[in-house]
Image (cartoon, helix red, strand yellow):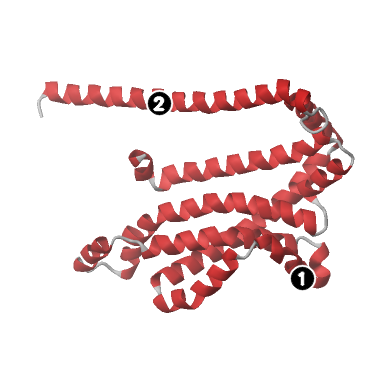
Amino acid sequence: MTIREAQATAASAVVARRRAGRLHLSDWAVRLGSVALVLGLWEFAGPRLNPLILRPPSAIFRAFFELVGTGELQEAFGQSLREFAAGMAIALVAGILIGVASGRNRFIYNAIDPIVGALYSTPSVALVPLISVAFGRAAMGDEPRIATVALFAIFPILINTQQGVRNVDQSLLEVARAFSSSERRLWTDVILPSATPFVLAGVRLAIGRGLIGMIVAEFLIGLVGLGYLIIAYENVFRIDRMFVPVVVVSAMGILLMSFVQWIEGRVAPWLRREQ
């Protein structure tokens, strides 16, 4: 390669990076613009349509600082975060282990597939009272709510991990075996990189389901955490304060999903290049 060709290649790379940066900024501009538009319409049109229910964002903003000032929001958030983190940890470990085992072993797959299909098809909300009864005296503690979060979150992780392992390109496996790759190298070099996009997609789905499970459990088992704040202020028609924990849960979902996307860019950078 001549010097002129090398300079042309470098210049084209700089242009491509600048173009990608402009596209990235334009994406964020569209996202922020859409959020600002919705909030603006809500602020000005909501109270005119139904001043009791559609409290404006400015009122919710003030209510946020009121709840922070009394300490109610921090206490409820800490309770909910503890339940969600423990339940998600259980769902991650169990979902990935069972998904990998069933994805690589036909006997295990056939044994658990009807059970997984039946449980996943059953509305998880219907099983929450059963979880409460199953824990008996421990139902006043965090355990049943943690179990509920795990129940809601495990299936997207399990199913996506299973499909990721089962759908590894067979030609890649054949090439690896042709070069006498060990089972460990087969996993680290072929199976896990191929299954990673499926696993991360399952985790992103599980975050949303886990947050739903967290709130449902707090509604039905013990009335604590952010779920308690929603019910308590809904009962006294303080809709501005009721919306505060709702917004906090939404923010939790956005931040956690963004974190998973960041991990995805680190461990599977080829996905971002393809997108």
Residue 40 or residue 131, whichever sits in front? 40
Residue at 74%, 57% in the rendered image: 217
Q: Earlier in the sequence, mark 2 or mark 1?
A: 2
Specify the quadrant that holds the C terminus.
top left
Specify the quadrant that holds the N terminus.
top left
Q: Position of residue 193 (x, y in %)?
A: 36, 55
Q: Is residue 73 found left or right of 195 in the rendered image?
A: right
Q: Residue furthest front?
A: 49
Q: Residues within 10 Å of mark 2 (few under 14, many from 20)?
A: few
Q: Quadrant of residue 128?
A: bottom right
Q: Position of residue 229 (x, y in %)?
A: 81, 44
Q: Residue furthest right?
A: 236
Q: Quadrant of residue 119?
A: bottom right
Q: Is residue 70 found left or right of 18 in the rendered image?
A: right
In the image, residue 67 sits, relative to residue 226, either above or below, namely: above
| Secondary-structure class at tag 2 | helix
Residue at 87%, 37% in the rendered image: 237
Residue 68 can be seen, yes or no:
no
| Secondary-structure class at tag 1 | helix
In the image, residue 108 sits, relative to residue 4, either above or below, namely: below
Residue 186 or residue 273, whichever sits in front? 273
- Residue 23, which numbered label? 2
- Residue 84, which numbered label? none
The reply to whether the C-beta atoms of the residues labelled 2 and 1 are less than 8 Å apart is: no
In the image, residue 55 sits, relative to residue 120, either above or below, namely: above
Whole-number angstrom distance, CA of label 2 to CA of label 1: 52 Å
Label 1, on which residue?
135
